[in-house]
Image (cartoon, rainbow, N blue to C red):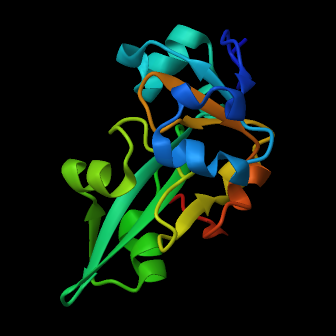
Amino acid sequence: MPSARGTLTWTPAPDQPDLLAAPVAAAIGTAPDALVAPIDAELADTAAFCAAYDVALEASANCVVVAGRRGEITRYAAVLVLATDRADINNVVRRRLDVRRISFAPHEDAVQLTGMEFGGITPIGLPAQWPILVDRRVADCPEAVIGSGLRRSKVLVTGAALAALPGAEVLDLVR
């Protein structure tokens, strides 16, 4: 039966900085007890990852970067929802950021601004001024699998640790 830990071998994340993107390694202390496991980078996308490593979809949390505009100002944020859910970007997130238009940040912008690989972006180590919008269902997870900033590894944390990250706000984000 799939679980959050699946068939992976997890080790303390601070002991494996080579498995974390540089900004994630620098901020990993903000997620106490975080664990990390190496994976095949070709299997980093959620569905393939969960199938290959017997990880439950409902224990996998996806982090997307959104960009909202109001006039000439662009505001970025990270949105974290379970892989089984879809965030209400156009209503809840747009209102929270107080922007007129919102969309997923362009691939190149997300990579450049975070210092992380696309497909591995995680809420740990994001720019300090960005809000991290955590869906309530993620915050309630006893254990959740998230990106490591790299496609070749994953991080295991508690939902409570995600809710306690600097800049994190727990909201009902699912439509």
Q: What percent of the width, then of the height, locates residue 60?
A: 59, 34
> Looking at the image, is 161 positioned above or below residue 128?
above
For the point 43% across and 36% down, the residue is 120
For the point 53% across and 34% down, the residue is 20
Quarter of image, res 117: top left
For the point 39% across and 76% down, the residue is 94
User: Is 175 positioned to the left or the right of 156 in the image?
Assistant: left
> Looking at the image, is 77 positioned above or below residue 48?
below
> Looking at the image, is 81 positioned above or below residue 90?
above
- For residue 144, say whether it is visible: no
Q: What percent of the width, then of the height, locates residue 126?
A: 49, 58
- For residue 147, say whether it is visible: yes
For the point 27% across and 58% down, the residue is 105
Q: What percent of the width, then of the height, locates residue 112?
A: 27, 52
Instruction: Out of 164 and 50, give the one closest to the viewer.
Output: 164
User: Is 161 positioned to the left or the right of 27 in the image?
Assistant: right
Quarter of image, res 33: top right
Q: What percent of the width, then of the height, locates residue 143?
A: 75, 36
